[in-house]
Amino acid sequence: MSEFLAAEHDYIGLSEFPTMEATKPTSDNKTKTTDNNNNNDDDVLNFKATELRLGLPGSESPERVDQRLCSLKSSCPVSGAKRVFSDAINGSTKWVFSTDSSAVEDIKPDVPVKEKKSSASAAAPASKAQVVGWPPIRSFRKNTMASSQKQGGGGDNNNNNSETEGEAKSGPEPCLYVKVSMEGAPYLRKIDLKTYKSYVELSSALEEMFSCFTIGQFGSHGGCGRDGLNESRLTDLLRGSEYVVTYEDKDSDWMLVGDVPWEMFICSCKKLRIMKSSEAIGLAPRVMEKCRSRN
Amino acid sequence: MDRRFPFKVLEHIFSFLDANEDRNSVSLVCKSWFETERRTRKRVFVGNCYAVNPLKVARRFPKMRSLTLKGKPHFADYNLVPDGWGGYAWPWIEAMAARRPLLEEIRLKRMVVTDECLEKIAASFRDFKTLVLTSCEGFSTDGIAAIASTCRKLRDLELRECNVDDLGGDWLSYFPETSTSLVSLDFSCLDSEIKLSDLERLLSRSPNLKSLKLNRSVTLDVLEGLLRRAPQLVELGTGSFSDELDPEEISKLTKALSELKQLKSLSGLWDLLPEYIPVLYSVCPRLTSLNLSYATVQMPDLVDLLSRCSKLQKLWVMDMIEDKGLKTVALCCKELRELRVFPSGADLDEEDVALTEQGLVSVSEGCKKLESVLYFCVQFTNAALVTIAKNRPNFRCFRLCVMEPFAPDYRTQQPLDEGFKAIVERCKDLRRLSVSGLLTDKAFEYIGVHAKKLRMLSIAFAGDSDLMLHHLLSGCESLKKLEIRDCPFGDTALLENAAKLETMRSLWMSSCFVSFGACKQLSQKMPRLNVEVIDEHPPKTRPDSSPVERIYIYRTVAGPRQDTPEFVWTIHKNPEVGVSRLSTR
């Protein structure tokens, strides 16, 4: 929890605004690493006093603001303040436009560094040193400028689609977002298929997401240890519940979710749609055909 | 004797009222004025799509012809609102399709629009004329094709900075051969290539086309042919401006541009190469609007261009313009009303930063009509702000983004309090303000005292305590939208000024010290506010003292919304309940 918060807010490794940093050293937060332990005592006290934590009993109350104010005023306007900030953000070009992590780190070793910076520059990709949404530039502009900076960006960079949209892309992807729509629901969701390991996980996640609409019991057919669901299970589902999950595959066919092994599914799934089982009945024969043609 | 105006007379008088603010005031006078006004309102504006129920709006305005809606909070532009938060257009489209089939114009900003929505629009409104989508997402080019093919009277189709699932350039071919009504077409945010012949034919049969904004994939070599088919253009957004042309092509393009006698606005110009700047010289003297913010042109080439734009009213550039370039603007562009300077991402570590506060000072001196500014700069001084304020008391919109959080006045090391004080003191008509740099509570005291007409205020990394928020909420009488991020306060000021929140459209606070308990109290106190907690990493338990990641508070007569995703909770009015998904009806 707090590590996520730290990742989001960890933009300055400075004591100027200690508030937003979690002091808990977290192993998966590269920008923190063991750095917190190296702080001098003053800093640690200030950090602890003003740490923004979620949900832990005895979290700080707003009276602590005064302490933060003191620390802020004491560490504040040094003539090198500006440089110090930009030092902490490596590769200045990259911090302004935080699009993807392929921007190369530009470390300047001769610049006077603070402790935090050295750890920040160690392993973190440019995006870790970013402030979310700062400076306030619209993502359209950021994406456009980023692709201008890459030579030959031309028109074939996905300027406008989210760079994480992984429709029908093969090969290793950091995440595989597909859109999920539901019949009758006014909204779409996007999910990362890579975060699920099986149909069971996927279906419970979908159920959660669209829980205000009755999905039926398709997620709770327990005991399905295999990745695929066989024919009889499918018909069980269709009879038992109001809605079923379908997906659009690479051939742009609409298939019932569950007929192929999980790995194959996530490679070929472009879109998901939860539709009424009465409409999905028509899909079942196609599914059988495809299965037969594959076997 | 009936002392009231006959309905027909009242109706006629109201037909002269355009501004919705006036109409809103008028509708509050008495029941009969309310009734008359509502029957005559044609253009409906809803600043927060969750403030009111779409069906009620449909029922209230039977003569509605134009609907404008805004969805997500403004900070969604900067990725501060997680995906899936909301802002769905569907319920509105559905309601209007059922009850107001004569609707002609739909303008949406920051909303989720699906292909189903677009298909519904195409199928339901037979006189549909105008679709403008700004910063919207959720649809693909299939939806656009539906609009193009079905809306016989389509005049305006504008996609402004939308996130579109681009399935290819086919959509352009869906405009029927019989369609000749197009007035404006903006597909600048799309990625893929369109078929040139489709576009050429469309232009040839659209004599009324006044505004055309191409996307980047339209190459420079085809531009000349397009312009020859649309010499009546008033607004042009070019495609890429960097392809190689031979001298003959250059000369043809130059001629084609010079034929655009009505051209007033120029944009696009992606990757504009310096050698092509002379091509634009012929249009410069007529231009009132120039958007160079995607043109990676440096000084001194920019000067050659800008010095010819004596009628310019609106200029968007990147910081490559440097102080020198802005001096030229101050000298040559005496009609300038709006200036925006965007950061190019040039190396911030450089000691000689070429764009400084001086640039803005020069423009404020030379351009007497300047009233709207968006300026990104690495650092600033109080003295500069004071000078700017003295020069230009006519500012209506002043947005300064000192890119270094907490950057003080770099000469005096003082907070920028005095500088912003000068701005709000002198600019009595200031409607919109964005502050930045090192600011203490004092700055906000000044804002509270002086900025009486201020409607929208954006704050980041500022202030010391709850006093800051208190000054704003108790002082700024006209405040409608307040958005705050990363500021060290929350509860006390919020609760003390709870009543103020119902006079505002919305309040956004993220990464501040607002506790869950305060959210509950606020929600209970104010029945007509939706208090939304947005927490992507919610704690397992929520003691009252636990801080929330983000809150979004807005007034509404529609009650809590039913479409919240799993990371948004509307605080229940019953404090025992705390938060709920409100998914039960």
Image: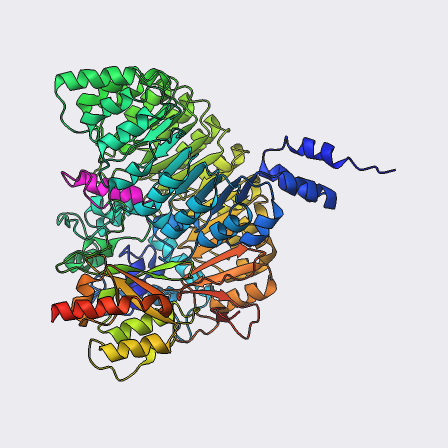
Quadrant of the rendered image containing residue A26: bottom left
Quarter holding residue B144: top left
In terms of depth relative to the viewer, which is nearer, B94 or B448? B94
Total count of labels: 0
Nearer-the-camera pick, A164 or B364: A164
Foreground: A94 or B266?
A: B266
| Viewer-side residue, B307 vs A260 | A260
Residue ID at (46%, 29%): B371
Tell me if residue A69 comes above or below residue A103 in the rendering. Answer: below
Residue A154 covered by magenta stretch: yes
* Quarter that holds the N terminus of chain A: bottom left
**Residue B460 seen in this snapshot:** no
Lateral position of residue A293 relative to residue B514, left or right = left
Q: Is residue B549 left or right of residue B67?
A: left
Q: Quadrant of the C terminus of chain A?
A: bottom left
> Compared with residue A97, is residue A52 higher up or lower down, i.e. above or below?
below
Q: Position of residue B112 (x, y in %)?
A: 39, 52
Q: Is residue A264 visible?
A: yes
Q: Is residue B185 left or right of residue B450?
A: left
Residue A123: percent from left, percent from top: 15, 59
Q: Residue furthest bottom?
A: A223
**Which image quadrant for residue B345?**
top left
- Write the start and end of the magenta stretch as one range: A134-158
Q: Residue at x 56, y 53 (%)?
A: B55
